[in-house]
Image: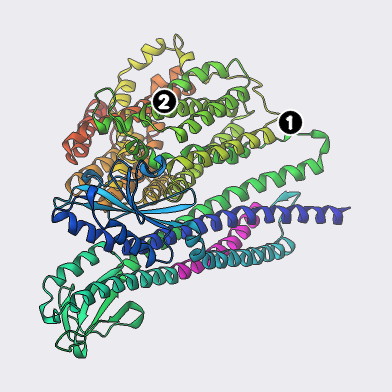
Amino acid sequence: MAEVRSKRIKIVMLTSAILLIILVLGFTGGLNIASFQKNYTNSLIASYAVSGQETVRKIEYAVKYGKPLTNFFGIEELLSEKVKNSEYLEAVQVILPDGSILYDQHGTVQGQKLPQEVQQQINFQPDKGEDTFTSTLYGGKYHAIIPIRDAQSAWIGSLDLLFDERVIREHTAKYLNQLVRYLALLAALALLGLYFFVQKAPLVVDNKINKKYMLTGFIVILGVVQIIYSAINYQMFKHAYREIAQETVAISATIMQKDINYVINKGVPYSKLYDLESYMQRIVKGVPEIESINLLGADNQVLYTTASRAISETTRDDLSTGLHLAKDRQNNSAKISVRISESYLNSKLQAVILDGLTVLVASLIIMVETTLFLLIFLNRWLQREKVPAQGGSGLFEPGIMRPLSFVLFFAVFMPSAFIPLLMKEIYQPFLGLSKNIVLGLPISMEMLAAGLATVVAGYLVDKYDWRKIFFTGLFVLAVGTALSGLAREPLLFILARGIVGIGYGCSAISMRSFINTLPGDEAKSQGFTAMTAGLYAGLLNGVVIGAMLADRMGYSQVFFVALAFMLLAVLFALAFFRDTSLAGRQACSLAKAVGQGSGGLWGFFGNKQVLTFFLLIVFPLTVCSMFLDYYFPLFAESMGASTSNVGRAFMLNGLCIVYLGPLLGKYTSKYLSPGGSILLSGLIIILAFLLFSLKATLLTAFIVVVLLGVAESFGLLAQNNYFLRLEATQRVGSGKALGYYDNIRKMGQMSGPLLFGGVLAFGILGVGAIGAVSFVLLGLFWLTNRQRGGLSNKPDKGVGL
């Protein structure tokens, strides 16, 4: 019997291991493959757009000398030549800024416009920057669109190069097939390793799963496989980018060869090619893959160059492309040499490394969370096998809150890194408010709605089973998320985020309420710890993966991916919380405290210690924390950072809170009182803002984000401890008081984007102004509370600073 039981346990473990491999490697492989396809596609389209620049230059040259674009004689010959000379192009057309198609390779086009979906992607106005081209996929066709400008650099039209997506698939197929094959091979190796691990390791001790062995073994085996896969990805990216760069450089060299030969054949000698270096500089500027261009004479003598100093032609063959030119009338020979930019290749590979590390960290978190869930599941299975008569009701494990919290908050936080960016994309003037304030309205509405929903749900959860409020919240959350993905105008998007806030507030308060009903303080503590750990793990992964997906599939599509994870949370709750109910409903609502305790609601808020803590510490420092949620994404985008890098900033901030929190919290609680820790946390945030106002660079912004994480890693715990030790808090009750505290934080989160948007009229100094005001308020807090104790830690003698 024992042998049969042992065999069944190993079968269940192996089945769990297979599911873990599919989940983790499927996630890693899918994200890496999507990343590769997106980056490779962008580089290929850029190389194709290079050839279109030649046609654009010819059109712009004619326009600058008086030829109107709307009456351009001979344009069909120019466009048809482009199609004939390009094996991949299906059509070339000239379009006006309003989307009207003016010409194609067959001549004038009447009454046709680009599809609205394509037209929305085109904006070469000065406030959008001097983009060299943009691209989009619609109806199975790629559009590579290059701006046409007049003598004053005003955007007067665009050249649209159309080619079938099959062209991209054919180029990427060989690399994608290799990635899939490597992934399948590594999955098989991981399964083999896990098989021997399950067979040999002592995973079951005293009828319980050995948590340490299983967690370590699974993470080590899958972690090694992921590192190997990341290294393979890097090598493939490196080869692919070099191949694309060589193709782009070859196209550019061929264009220059044609242009220079045309002039030489007109009788101009190489010594008289005036303004040639300006012509070559324009090509270098428009093609980032090119580092420099040299026109070389006999014995590789440099005649013309774009480099800051003349260099000899001794470069490696794989970094330089050379084409021979026609002989001039003096019988002199020459060649054009184009060098690939190593700095461009390195920047691409650095992005690959960052993506790889981000995916690795995210996948490690998923591995830990999934393995912990498997541990809980297997232990429950073992207990059911041992005592089948108990059923499910007596076997509830508080730790099961962790995977539920992880999946739910993973979905909730997926769009967090780009909410202001999406609002900026669909921005329209609204109620006469400044643009910066309008961009902050979605976040403010979400936080306001979440705070109000917490109050209302607190009432309702005392009357109804927690699951009704939880599933209602999930439904509202799903509706708001779907509307967020569908929104194409600001008011709908703001309302959608408000609906999300309502769903979030209801779901979160119902989960907390359920934990409060668990029997015994230990179970409650385990439940809250599990929920918090799952929340932060979900936040870390959700934000960064949402940001990476936004770079690859667009902002709107991420909301629908989040919907799928919300559905998973619903299924998980239905499967593992069937036998849970509010046995003894406990008051969790903020509003229920009104009229109770010492002086009721107004008596509590009228307390000097409570009032100064809320107004001088909680509210301003929470406002400062919205630098990450509202200001940083907008600033990073203005500095050229991708949405993925914005997501990485959120991850760095979260990692500081999650992993530095226990260490710094232990250290500061040993040497400082809670009040002293609060002051230190506030000073770190203020110094970070001062640093940013003095030197506003992308690196400084990342440093601010990290310092915010460091400050909050121990500062939030210190605020909690300080608040709970206040006499007024103890009189009203910790549960009710923490409800007040949470809502004050929600008010700060709601006000933060509006305050940041308001002060940004002063530019970067506005951030410094918020830091200065916070410093004054921090000083007032110290002055009004300093008589209550020093900075030494006296936990048993009050709550002094």
Is 230 contained in the magenta span?
A: yes
First in sequence, mark 2 or 1: give its number. 1
Q: Residues within 10 Å of mark 2 (few under 14, many from 20)?
A: many
Give the magenta-colored segment's residue range. 211-237
Tell me: residue 517, above or below residue 247: above
142 w.r.t. 739: above or below: below
* Residue 133: x %, y % from top left: 31, 54
Find out whether residue 316 is within the magenta segment. no
Looking at the image, the residue that sits furthest to the right is 1
* Residue carrying label 1: 393
Point 46% across, 15% down: residue? 591
Residue 725 in view here: no
Residue matched to label 2? 495
- Of circles 2 and 1, the one toward us is 2
What is the quadrant of the C terminus in the image? top left
In which image quadrant can residue 780 be found? top left
- Residue 648 vs residue 88, the one in the foreground: 88
